[in-house]
Amino acid sequence: MNRARPDTMAPEVLVVLHDVDDNLGELAPPFAEAGLRIVMWDVARDPDGAPPLETLDRFSAIVSLGAYAGVTDESSHPWMTHERRMLESALDADLPVLGLCFGSQLLAAAAGAPFRPSPVPELGWTRARLTAAASADALMAPLATAGDEIDVFHYHFDSHDLPEGAVLLAETDGIIEAYRVGDSAWGLQFHLEVGLATQLAWIAGARHVFAREGLDPAAHEQLSHEHWKAYRDHTHAVGAAFAEQVLQRHAQR
């Protein structure tokens, strides 16, 4: 039986997976629908699979996902040094980048922004305020159609300063929620990629953490049931917008 061969001319997106329970999730469908080829690097289970820096030009974009590790743990995670250098190279080359939660923090570090703990842990559902710049931003504009504030799903204790020259796109009480570096690199502190099933799994596995922080996990489970469809639609819209940036970059090669 003949098997279809992959389209080697399709734009390739390198997705850096740090923990198996935080994968590309709801962003995978809009990427695939746009014709992008997703290439995964699992830093924990395939440490030797790291793409060499000199081969990064095969990719048309990089997506960096969430992680249990933080940017201050780099000395104990060799993959983090390599990934940070990849992001620095991507910024230098104006390659489209999307960082989510930890990925956002590592992107900020690659852009020279200092680390800082989050003023408060953000767990489960919070509301982020979009800045005026968001409505004109190539990636965030689909979210701006929902109003000045959006419901977003979090799980983080760390944060960072705004990289020099970056554009702030969303914030919550002084916490940077979204920003853009240059014209084609975005960091989102919230987990846009996480769908309903994963949200519920994360909450179930961290009930003691929610309780420790004075949060009711059952209330956040309820919010997941209320918000999941709108959140999925937002994710697909942002994913399609990022895919368009990738296609444009690929066409310029």
Image (cartoon, rainbow, N blue to C red):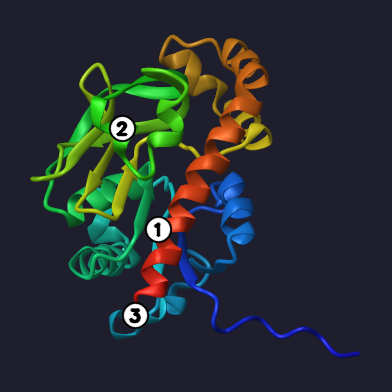
Question: Is residue 72 visible in this depiction of the protein?
Answer: no
- Residue 149: x %, y % from top left: 39, 17
Say left or right for 24 vs 187. right
Residue depicted at x 56% and y 49%: 27
Q: Identify the residue at the far bottom of this view.
A: 2
Quadrant of the drawing holding the N terminus: bottom right
Q: Which amino acid is tagged 1?
A: Gln
Q: Does the residue at mark 1 contact the one at mark 2 (Cβ under 8 Å)?
A: no
Mark 1, secondary structure of its residue: helix
Please tell me which residue is depicted at 57% across the width and 42% down the height of the picture: 236
Amino acid at the residue labelled 2: Ala
Indicate which label's residue lies in the foreground, 3 or 2. Answer: 2
> Which of the 4 image quadrants contains residue 184?
bottom left
Left/right of residue 198 with respect to residue 174 in the rendered view: right
User: Residue tagged by mark 1?
Assistant: 245
Q: Name the residue under label 2.
A: 134
Quick one: label 3 or label 1, which is nearer the N terminus? Answer: 3
Q: Can residue 147 be seen in this view?
A: yes
Q: Is residue 127 above or below residue 242?
A: above
Real-space Cα separation, disc 3 to disc 2, in angstroms: 29 Å
| Pointers 3 and 1 in contact (C-beta within 8 Å) | no
Q: Which of marks 1 and 2 is nearer the N terminus?
A: 2
Residue 57: mark in rendering: 3
Give residue 174's position: percent from left, percent from top: 20, 21
Q: Distance between the residues labelled 3 and 1?
A: 16 Å
